[in-house]
């Protein structure tokens, strides 16, 4: 019945971009695949970790069976050290939306990286492109003094962004600091000025409503299964291959497993730590979803 209701909505709005959203572990992929099957569609992933090759178990990539049931795009398209940001994602997704429609397929966007979803649907503030020299300097600071030092630099020039970003999120902290260093204006000012008021695609956001207790249970079960399926070994291999500085290595779960592998976290603490971090991430996702119109099922 849940899928039936979305299918009816989608068929009544053939030109609207169907977008499956929701907190992590809520069942987005399963819903998107079911919709693609019913609507003759294809799934465009909006996940900033699934885009990278090698980050398989911990990103919850669609299974072989799910990919056989529905074509998936923007999964496994980049090497771990390649920079894929929201602007590049939106550009690639734009092309895919047009191409899929031209082929008679219904594009279905699915993912939990909501900045990417916003970039596709509403555009982003016109901030400057990245500067490799600045980023190299930031990486050097993190390597020599730790992520707190980089976060302190940001807090000194952009209090709003610093309050919003966790010190360990060195990619986003570095980007916010980079914007200030390149423009003299805090990233938070650029974002407030833009306000995400542009409509690039008319969209219907749909998601599976989960009670907090149910979502917590799903998060715990998912984390346990991923660890049993080789998440630790995958992370160890990625680190051994020289991908410690990859953006995806800072993602929830990978960060905690890296701490465990480096002796900063005891084995007994690993699963609870991953679950706790995932729950915090899901809470942030729910906060974002509270500010947009979603058709909850």
Image: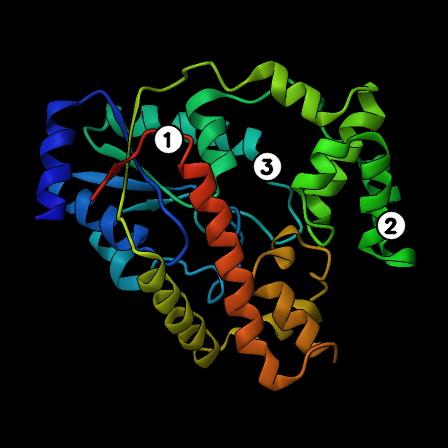
Closer to the camera in the image, 247 or 259: 259
- The label on residue 149 is 2
Image depth: mark 3 or mark 2 in front: 2
Question: Residue 138's spot in the image, x, y percent?
Answer: 84, 44
**Label 1 – label 3 distance at C-alpha:** 17 Å
- Above or below residue 292? Residue 63 is below
**Who comes first in sequence, dot 2 or dot 1?**
1
Q: Is residue 185 visible?
A: yes
Question: Residue 45's spot in the image, x, y percent?
Answer: 39, 44
Callout 2 crowding tier (Cα within 10 Å): few <14, some 14–19, many ≥20: some
**Who comes first in sequence, dot 3 or dot 2?**
3
- Above or below residue 189? Residue 117 is below
- The label on residue 133 is none
Image depth: mark 1 or mark 3 in front: 3
Question: Residue 252's spot in the image, x, y percent?
Answer: 57, 59
Please identify the quadrant where the C terminus is shown: top left
Mark 3 secondary-structure assignment: loop
Total numbered labels placed on residues in the image? 3
- The label on residue 85 is 3
Q: In the visual, does 11 lie left or right of 73?
A: left
Instruction: Please give the residue where the numbered disc 1 appears in the rendered image.
Output: 96
**Residue at 25 percent of width and 23 percent of height:** 16
**Label 3 – label 2 distance at C-alpha:** 23 Å
Question: Residue 49's spot in the image, x, y percent?
Answer: 52, 52
Residue farthest toward the right in the current orientation of the protein: 144
């Amino acid at each position: 019945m849940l899928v039936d209701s979305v299918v009816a909505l989608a068929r009544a709005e053939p030109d609207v971009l169907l977008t499956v959203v929701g907190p992590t572990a809520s069942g987005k992929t399963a819903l998107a695949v079911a919709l693609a099957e019913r609507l003759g569609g294809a799934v465009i992933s909006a996940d900033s970790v699934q885009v990278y090759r090698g980050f398989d178990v911990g990103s919850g990539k669609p299974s072989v069976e799910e990919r056989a049931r529905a074509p998936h795009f923007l999964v496994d398209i980049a090497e771990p050290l390649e920079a894929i940001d929201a602007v590049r994602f939106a550009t690639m997704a734009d092309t895919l939306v047009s191409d899929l429609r031209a082929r008679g397929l219904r594009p279905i966007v699915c993912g939990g990286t909501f900045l990417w979803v916003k970039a596709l649907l509403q555009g982003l503030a016109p901030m400057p492109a990245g500067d490799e020299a600045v980023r190299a300097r930031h990486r050097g600071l993190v390597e020599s003094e730790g992520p707190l030092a980089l976060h302190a630099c940001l807090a000194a020039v952009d209090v709003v962004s610093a309050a919003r970003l966790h010190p360990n999120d060195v990619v986003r902290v570095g980007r916010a600091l980079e914007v200030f260093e390149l423009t003299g204006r805090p990233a938070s000012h650029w974002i407030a000025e833009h306000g995400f008021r542009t409509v690039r695609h008319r969209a219907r956001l749909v998601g599976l409503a989960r009670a907090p207790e149910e979502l917590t249970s799903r998060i715990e079960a998912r984390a346990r299964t991923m660890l049993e399926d080789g998440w630790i070994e995958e992370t160890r291999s990625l680190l051994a291959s020289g991908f410690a500085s990859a953006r995806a290595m800072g993602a929830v779960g990978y960060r905690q497993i890296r701490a465990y592998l480096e002796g900063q976290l005891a084995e007994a603490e690993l699963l609870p730590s991953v679950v706790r971090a995932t729950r915090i991430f899901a809470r942030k996702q729910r906060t974002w979803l509270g500010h947009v119109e979603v058709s909850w099922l």
